[in-house]
Image (spheres, rainbow, N blue to C red):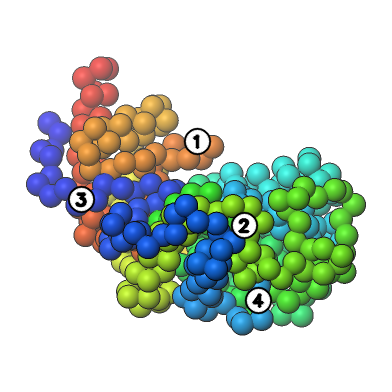
Amino acid sequence: MAMQQPATRPANPRFSSGPCAKPPAFALDKLADAPLGRSHRAAVGKAKLKAAIEGTREVLGIPDDYRIAIVPASDTGAMEMAMWNLLGARKAEMLAWESFGAGWVTDVVKQLKLDAEVKEAPYGEIVDLDGVDTDNDVVFTWNGTTSGARVPNGDWIKPDREGLTICDATSAAFAQRLPWDKLDVTTFSWQKVLGGEAAHGMLVLSPRAVERLETYTPAWPLPKIFRLTKGGKLIEGIFVGETINTPSMLAVEDYLLALDWAREVGGLEGLRERAYANLAAVQAFVAENEWLAFLVEQPEYRSNTSVCLKFTDDRITDGAAFAKAVVKRLDAEGVAYDIGAYRDAPPGLRIWCGGTVEASDVAALMPWIKWAFETEIEALADAA
């Protein structure tokens, strides 16, 4: 007989990997100061946008000589903007170990049609970083949102490299330490680790990236929404809040609220501690239940935000159907929303453990996963 339902439920069942859970301090009435119905180019709009940029710099510890821009189309828009502006000047190496990294490979090889060297690893692993030549332009994800596999550090990136490092860090920013001196282009979005609203991306450029922009013209035309230079010079306004397109000032206000909350919990270090406490709750449970395992077997490559798990019980004959049934059962009980593995990933669970999630909720969720697992195993036995 399957176990009884656990007595404790997560207070917040939102474990989606994007958009992610709002900060615990969130309330709609806290957005009342948003300058709605006003131009984003008015003084009040520019001030809010500049505060979002400088707040990002403060919380993440981004160097003063790095440029930060708010750009359209989330992390995807920021990455596309970076690749279309910067690639083509040198040989490119594309590193991929999950679906988003694979997407950047497709853009570079099939859309930009560059003769790039592609290095891939299966879900749950990462490529051999020692074999990467950072004298080439290197495009990679810091944290694979759909696989839960992350780069452990930036030691493999040469300080005197000749190429640019272009890093999709959307599920790592605000949860992991990023070595800014090793990153020339870094992108992320508001709806990931701080639980902001969708459609806005962040683009962070090192002085080396700015130099490339001002000395290199791609062979292909750039849409207006991608253009970062004019007359061979950086459009400086983009990096002080004069956005390329019209942003949502309500979403900006929401991001400012999230940044304030981040400061209250101790900034980046406080956010990291919260994420690692969530990961620890999952690790403790997995260690005691042999039917569940991390998709990423090596702990040093394991994400502390997008935590991916797989079922290992031999009685499961259709892993995708079983995982889907578990996810559906947890959703119906209102204890966990949106925790199914990404559509391109191996079947299993994906639990968001970023800093906006409470460790008590993760701890409360895990016995429910066991209940759903045992209930579905029993259903398999009854159907046999």
The foreground one among 121 and 217 is 217
Residues marked 2 and 1 touching at CB (< 8 Å) = no
Residue depicted at x 23% and y 43%: 335
Q: CA distance from mark 2 to mark 4?
A: 16 Å
Residue linked to disc 2: 71
Residue linked to disc 1: 343
For the C terminus, the quadrant is top left
The amino acid pointed to by label 3 is Pro
Name the front one of labels 4 and 1: 4
The percent coordinates of residue 147 (x first, y second) are 50, 49
SS at circle 1? loop
The amino acid pointed to by label 2 is Val
Residues marked 2 and 3 touching at CB (< 8 Å) = no
Name the front one of labels 2 and 4: 2
SS at circle 3? loop
Q: CA distance from mark 4 to mark 1?
A: 36 Å
The amino acid pointed to by label 4 is Tyr
Residue depicted at x 27% and y 36%: 331
Q: How many marks?
A: 4
Name the front one of labels 2 and 1: 2
At label 4, counting other C-alpha atoms closer than 10 Å, the crowd grade (few under 14, some 14-19, many 20 or more) is: some
Residue linked to disc 3: 10
The foreground one among 44 and 5 is 44
**Among numbered discs 4 and 1, the one appearing first in the sequence:** 4
Residues marked 2 and 4 touching at CB (< 8 Å) = no
The amino acid pointed to by label 1 is Arg
